[in-house]
Amino acid sequence: MRTFAQRLMARPGDRGGGAQKLENVVIIDCGSQFTQLIARRVREMNIHSVVLSWDARRERVAEFSPKGIIISGGPDSVNDPDAIAVDRRVLDMGAPVLGICYGMQLLAKTLGGAVGSGERSEYGVTRVRRSGNSRLMEGLPDELQVLMSHGDRVTSLPEGFRATASTEGGVTAAMEDRAGRFFGLQFHPEVVHTEHGRDILRRFLFDICGCAGDWRLEDWVEGAVADIRRQVGEGRAVCGLSGGVDSSVAAALVNRAIGPRLTCIFVDHGLMRLNEAKHVVASYSGMGLSVRHVDASALFLDRLAGVTDPEKKRRIIGGLFIDVFDAEAAKIGEVDWLLQGTIYPDVIESGHRKGAVLIKSHHNVGGLPEHMKLRLLEPLRDLFKDEVRAIGRLIGVPEDIVDRQPFPGPGLAVRCLGEITRERLDTLREADAIFREELRRAKLYDGIWQSFCVLLPVRTVGVMGDSRTYSEVVALRAVNSQDAMTADWVRIPPEVLDVTAKRICNEVRGVNRVVLDVTSKPPATIEWE
Ligand code: XMP
C-alpha cells in the first residue's frame, strides 16, 4: 500500500502546475517503525520528503531527482537469504545516502563490507564515542547518548570507509566514506532519545545534500488538494464529522479539493457537552462544508435507558452510530469515497513481510455496508497531531475546533456513570461547563490535554441551609499527556478547585459534593469508563 506522501508525489512533474520544481529527499522504507518519524523530521526542516518502498527501482527514485536519500531501519537481518535489499543502482545516482540502522548494514554489505550477528543485541539508550573526523557529526560532543535497536552489526567496513563512532562494546556506531557520499548510523537520529539527532540530520540535509529548506506547509496543502482531485476525479465522498480536529481538518481539506461533492454527516447522539452540537454545526457551516446534521439523540437515549455496564453502553452507541450514519449516507445517492480523519498515531503497523508494511487503521466511523463499495480516503494518515493542527489553522478551521481537547466517541455516556437519563446528563453538562469556565478564567484550560467532570452513581449526605441533602457526587478530572497512552493528573491550584466546587454545589441541582481524581494513567485510564 502506498503512503499518502507516495501518492502525493505519484506524478512529480505535474504537481503544483508543473512549473514549481520541488526539492526532494527520498526516504526508502525498509519497514522501520520510525520511517514516518524520519519523514516528519525532514518536514520540520522545511524539506519535502517522499517515502518509497524498499523495492522502488532506480528509475522510480530518479523521478524525484533526490537531493539526498535516506535508507530507514527495518526488522530484517541483511544476511538472511530473503532479506530485503535496495536496488544497487540507487546508490550510484550521485545523491548522498544516509543509511540508518538496517540501512547502514545494507550499505555496508552492498558496498563490500560485512555484517555479523552480535552475541547480544543492543536495544535502548546507550553511549557512543566519536573517533576521527566526521562530516556528519562535525562540531558535536565526543560522546553522545543514542538510541540503538539492533541485533546485527557491521563487522568490516567497505573499502574507502572509516568508523566515526563506536559503542563501549566496540560496535561500529557510525561510518562514512572518504568521498563524502555514503553515511551510516547504527543508531536512530530521528528519535528524541538520541542527543543531537536533529543536528546530525540537519548536517546531512543542509551541509551534505545542499538542501535549501524552502518547502512550506502551504506546499503540502496545495499538493494534497491536487492529489485528492486526481484521486477522486468526478466521484463523490462522504464523511462523518465529530467536532474533533482530525475529521474537521480532513473535511476542510477535501472540501477545498472537491467542494460540494463532499457531504459531511454529523450524527448528534445527544451525548455532547453543553451547547457543543450547536457550536460545532455552526463552525462547520462557517467553514463552507455541506453538513447533514442528524439529531438522533432521542434514539440513543432511548436505547441506553437502564444500561449501566460500560461496555454495553459503548457497544450500543457504536452500533447505533453506524446504523444512523449508514441510513443518512444512503440518502445521498451515488458515493464513491469514505473520507476519514485517520492520522499517523492511529495507524497500527500490524505486520511486516518482505518490507511490505501491513497497515490497519482505526475506523472512527465504522463499516459502511459492503454493497456501497466505498474506497477509503485518508489524506492525513502520514501526519502527526500537531501537524494536523497547523494545517487546520492554515486552511481556516476555526481555533475552537483546532484546539479542541480530545473527546471520546461515546461522549458523555462514559462520563455519566451508572444510568444515563436526560436529567443526569444535564447535571453533568452544567457541572462540566462550570469546571471549563473556571479553568479558562484561570488561563489553565488551553494548556491541559483533557479536563472534564464525571457524574458518579453514588449519593452522599450534605447540608444546605438548614436542610439535609442526599445528592450525587461530581468528580473533577484533568490530565496532561503526549499521546493518551500515558497521562499525569494535573495539579490544579487549590483556589481554582475551591471556586469550582463551590459553584457546582451552589449552581447545579442534585449535586452536593465534588471530589478530585488524583490518579495518573496507568494505573487508571483517562476516562472513567
Ligand atoms: P482512556 O480512557 O482509555 O482514553 O485512557 C484514552 C483517550 O481516548 C479517548 N477515548 C476515546 N476516543 N472513542 C474515541 O474516539 C472512544 O470510544 C474513546 N474512549 C476513550 C479518551 O478521551 C482519551 O483521550
Image (tube, rainbow, N blue to C red):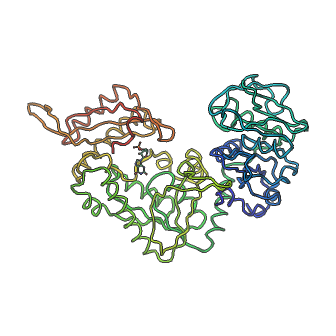
Question: In the image, residue 389 lies at what x, y percent?
Answer: 55, 47
Does 500 appear above or below 344?
above
The front one of 498 and 66 is 66
Question: In the image, residue 124 lies at what x, y percent?
Answer: 62, 32
Give the left or right position of residue 92, taking residue 124 as reference.
Answer: right
Question: In the image, residue 503 lies at what x, y percent?
Answer: 26, 35
Give the position of the N terminus as an image quadrant. bottom right
Give the left or right position of residue 172, taking residue 482 as reference.
Answer: right
Question: In the image, residue 288 lies at what x, y percent?
Answer: 51, 62
Q: Kindly give the residue lying farthest to the top in the view shown.
A: 142
Give the position of the C terminus as an image quadrant. top left
Q: Kindly give the residue lying farthest to the bottom in the view shown.
A: 333
Q: How many marks?
A: 0
Q: Residue at x 25, y 41 (%)?
A: 456
The front one of 222 and 196 is 196
Q: Residue at x 41, y 66 (%)?
A: 325
Q: Quadrant of residue 271?
A: bottom left
